[in-house]
């Protein structure tokens, strides 16, 4: 399961690479795609990218193009399944929340009926 920062970075990469499965992006372009309220820098981005590559979301190659660092990212099976997994996690959370609310209502009703009986 990805943390919030990894999920944001993976979402940006997925939006770039999902059609062809491969993309070429610089750290500056990636920083512009991420939410501005979180202060990302290039070192954090590089660390997150290497962690996602280790988790087999994509294959990561670093290169230089015109003197600027560039990443070549190729999605793998986990990377293609990223959106489906995030939707499934939200659905699982909604089901757990529904069960918690239902259980609380049932417990309240049972307590109310027992008070009424005794």
Image (tube, grey):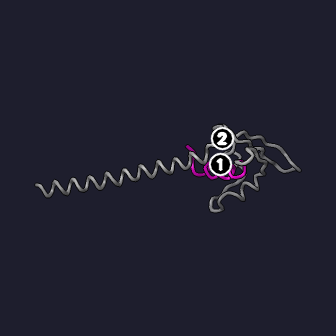
Which quadrant of the figure has residue 115? bottom left
- Quarter of the image for the C terminus: give it: bottom left
Question: What residue would you read off at disc 2?
Answer: 57
Q: Secondary structure at mark 2?
A: loop
How many numbered marks have been drawn onto this rendered protein structure? Answer: 2
Residue at 80%, 48% in the rendered image? 70
Stretch in magenta: 1-17
Numbered tag placed on residue 10 in the rendering = 1
1 left or right of 28 in image = left
Above or below: residue 75 compared with residue 114? above
Q: In the image, residue 104 lies at what x, y percent? A: 31, 54
Q: Which secondary structure dominates the residues rendered in magenta?
A: helix
The single residue placed furthest to the bottom in the displayed view is 37
Give the residue furthest to the right. 66
Q: Residue at x 69, y 45 (%)?
A: 49
Query: Mark 1 to mark 2: distance in Å?
Result: 8 Å
Question: Going 47% across and 47% down the picture, which residue do you hit?
Answer: 92
Residue 79: tell me if it is visible.
Answer: yes
- Quadrant position of the N terminus in the picture: top right
Q: What is the x, y in percent for residue 98?
A: 39, 53
- Horizontal relation, residue 102 to residue 69: left or right: left
Say whether residue 44 is visible. Answer: no
Q: Secondary structure at mark 1?
A: helix
């Amino acid at each position: 399961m990805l943390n919030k920062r990894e999920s944001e970075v993976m979402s940006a990469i997925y939006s770039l690479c999902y059609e062809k499965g491969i993309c070429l992006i610089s750290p500056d372009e990636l920083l512009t795609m991420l939410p501005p309220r979180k202060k990302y820098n290039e070192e954090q981005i590089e660390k997150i990218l290497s962690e996602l590559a280790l988790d087999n979301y994509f294959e990561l190659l670093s290169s230089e193009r015109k003197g600027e660092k560039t990443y070549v990212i190729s999605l793998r099976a986990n990377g293609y399944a990223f959106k489906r997994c995030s939707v499934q996690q939200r659905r699982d959370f909604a089901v757990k929340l529904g069960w918690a609310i239902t259980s609380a209502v049932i417990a309240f009703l049972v307590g109310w009926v027992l008070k009424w009986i005794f």
